[in-house]
Amino acid sequence: MFITILACLACRKTDSGRVPRGVLPQKSSPFRTFSKLGKVGFTLPDFHFPYHLNSPINSWKLDHDLDEISGLAWNDVGELACIQDERGDLFLYDFGEKHTKPALDFGKQGDYEGIAKVKGKYWVVRSDGQLFSVKRKGKKKKFATFLAQINDVEGLAYQQAQNRLLLACKGLPGKAVHLRNHKAIYAFDLKSKRLLPQPVYTVNLDELKQFLPPIAKKSRIEDPIFGPSGIAVHPLTGDIYLVAHAGKLLLVLSHSGKLQYVERLAPQLFPQPEGICFSPQGHLFIANEGTNKRGRILHFEPF
């Protein structure tokens, strides 16, 4: 399924034939750009983005075990489950004590990049696409997929409506010609325990890039334009949120895959965003790797 940005991108020209800097085609484009209160991005006019990403209501410093936090998930008892990208250890963040505690060991050393909680089980994905199903007592199963290290899977989320896991690829989207210059999201069906053969969502980088100059002019976006490092499904709307360290962007897709919103992430608050999840009430949590400092989780309240 493709994300199509519906627009003829021919900007209004000056008498000299040049396109004015920062001008977007207001009549032909469905998007409007914004730059106010430190926020820079573009959005569909009828889409409401319910978070102030420059104003977290909480910022929690993590223990050194999670300096390289890579995945984040909300569990059934109101805790944040965290993994890091070097060891197969799962930690829980205790809101009362404001620190993390070890929960279980699910694997050997490896590049673990995403976590999701589904009906009493944790699911963890490795960057080569291998999935692990883990119960609280540490019992685990492995599930191979056709993805590999070249696909560089960086995010994992549970899509309840379809009873499937979403795997966001930072690397190669696939072998098909039509996937060139795209980022792909694959789906793992939880009933059949199989990865669907084609991406269920894609982000067209060429189309996305045409809308980024007004953002880049204010926030110095450079290539790579976008490489997802985390994915989450909003529990109330079904929208799909993608966060990216490569490109410093947050994207929102509809459940049908339509691009709805893009915002530039402030590097001061988001030095290396790697994990994203929601509480059942729609509170947003984004985890940042330490980058020579302690890792942090930022908490955003919906409005």
Image: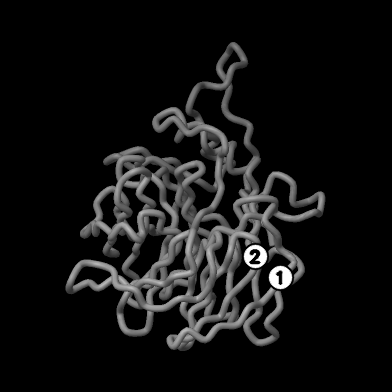
Residue extending farthest top: 16
Q: Position of residue 214 (x, y in %)?
A: 47, 32
**171 and 183: which one is in front?**
171
**11 and 271: which one is in front?**
271
Q: Which residue sits at x=30%, y=51%?
A: 294
Q: Which residue sits at x=67%, y=49%?
A: 182
Q: Which image quadrant: the C terminus?
A: bottom left
Q: Quadrant of residue 259?
A: bottom right
Q: Position of residue 78 (x, y in %)?
A: 30, 79
**Is residue 157 found left or right of 282 in the rendered image?**
right
Residue extending farthest front: 108
Classify mark 2: residues with Cα within 10 Å, few (<14), some (14-19) or many (20+).
many
| Tag shown at residue 129 | 2
Q: Position of residue 166 (x, y in %)?
A: 58, 69
Q: Quadrant of residue 206?
A: top right
- Whether residues under marks 2 and 1 lie with C-beta atoms below 8 angstroms apart, the answer is yes
What's the CA distance linking mark 2 and mark 1? 6 Å
**170 and 239: which one is in front?**
170
**Residue with the mark numbered 1:** 145
Q: Is residue 120 above or below residue 291?
A: below
Q: Considering the numbered disc 2 on the image, is that residue within a helix, a strand or a loop?
A: loop
Which residue type does callout 1 highlight? Thr
Which residue type does callout 2 highlight? Gly
**Is residue 132 found left or right of 295 in the rendered image?**
right
- In the rendered view, how is the structure colored? one colour
Q: Considering the numbered disc 1 on the image, is that residue within a helix, a strand or a loop?
A: loop
Q: Is residue 174 above or below residue 79?
A: above
Which sits earlier in the primary sequence, circle 2 or circle 1?
Answer: 2
